[in-house]
Structure formats: structure tokens, C-alpha cells
């Protein structure tokens, strides 16, 4: 399978795009990366819907070109079923770390991979 058609690689590329401040501040760039049924449970514990995250993303941490940026590490993924990829990784931003999990789905081969679910769990400074 080529890099362009590998579902895990495509999901990782989408995940990394969502960390880019230029994408985070543009609904036109963010919309195609999020499933209309998207839900997130953020590191704060807040539950976000598709419309809520689109409205808030430009103001959230990691959304300014000159501010702190997400630094992802150890991104791995697995194809759970046709059209469903699970990614796990860690991020650091402004000294705060979190473990993250995302589900990416593609309902039709003619549509792009989109983030369906995302969860972030803070990592205590004393836990490695």
C-alpha cells in the first residue's frame, strides 16, 4: 500500500494538521478534518461538540503562530476496521503533557478521513 492510501498515515497527517495554528484558526481548513458527529473530551474534562470546537478552536491554546505549539510524540495507529483508524500519542504544550486518543473514520472511499472522536488525559508531572 502506498503512503497516500495508507489509512493510518492519512489519519496521522490529519491529526498533525489539526495541531497547526494556521488550520486551528480557520474553519474552512478545520471543517474538512472533523466529522460532523465529532465529539471531544478535552484534557480539562469538558465535552466539545463539532460546532462548539469549531467556534472555540481559534481561541484555544496552540492556535497562535507565535504562542506555544503542540509537540506530539510517539504517534501510533491501527486500522480497527475498514474506515476506522485509532491513533494514540502524547503531546506537550507550554510544559503540560497529555495522553491522547483519536478515532478517525471515512464512511465512503470518495470522502476524506475525518476525526470522529478525540480524548485528552492530562499527565501529572510526577507520572512518566
Image: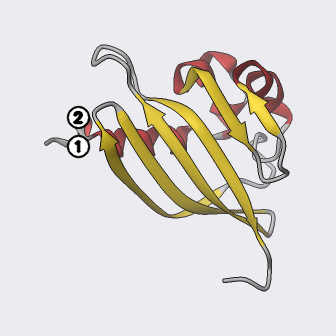
Q: Residue 37: where, in percent of width, then height?
A: 60, 21
- Please, what secondary structure does the residue beneath circle 2 have? helix
Residue depicted at 80% across the width and 24% down the height: 52
Disc on res. 3:
1
20 sits to left or right of 25: left
In the image, residue 36 above or below residue 11:
above
96 sits to left or right of 13: right
Residue depicted at 53% across the width and 26% down the height: 33
Q: In which quarter of the image is residue 80?
A: top left
Residue 19 shows in the view: no
Residue farthest toward the front in the current orientation of the protein: 81
Residue depicted at 74% across the width and 23% down the height: 54
Q: How many labels does the image show?
A: 2
Q: Residue 53: where, in percent of width, then height?
A: 76, 28
Residue depicted at 62% across the width and 27% down the height: 38
- Please, what secondary structure does the residue beneath circle 1 have? helix
Q: Quadrant of residue 106?
A: top left
In the image, residue 4 above or below residue 100:
above
- Mark pair 1, 2: CA separation: 6 Å
Q: Residue 19: where, in percent of width, then height?
A: 62, 44
Disc on res. 79:
none
Residue 44 shows in the view: yes
Q: Residue 78: where, in percent of width, then height?
A: 35, 52
Task: Say which quadrant the N terminus sits in.
Answer: top left
Mark 1 touches mark 2? (CB < 8 Å) = yes
> Which residue is tagged 2?
5
Amino acid at each position: 500500500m502506498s503512503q497516500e492510501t495508507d489509512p493510518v498515515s492519512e489519519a496521522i497527517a490529519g491529526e498533525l494538521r489539526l495541531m497547526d495554528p494556521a488550520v486551528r484558526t480557520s474553519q474552512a481548513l478545520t471543517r474538512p478534518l472533523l466529522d460532523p458527529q465529532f465529539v471531544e473530551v478535552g484534557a480539562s474534562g469538558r465535552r466539545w461538540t463539532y460546532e462548539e470546537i469549531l467556534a472555540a478552536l481559534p481561541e484555544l491554546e496552540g492556535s497562535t503562530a507565535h504562542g506555544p505549539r503542540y509537540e506530539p510524540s510517539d504517534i501510533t495507529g491501527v486500522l480497527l476496521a475498514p474506515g476506522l483508524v485509532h491513533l494514540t500519542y502524547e503531546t506537550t504544550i507550554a510544559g503540560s503533557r497529555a495522553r491522547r486518543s483519536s478515532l478517525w473514520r471515512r464512511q465512503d472511499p470518495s470522502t476524506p478521513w475525518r476525526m470522529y472522536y478525540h480524548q485528552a488525559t492530562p499527565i501529572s508531572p510526577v507520572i512518566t
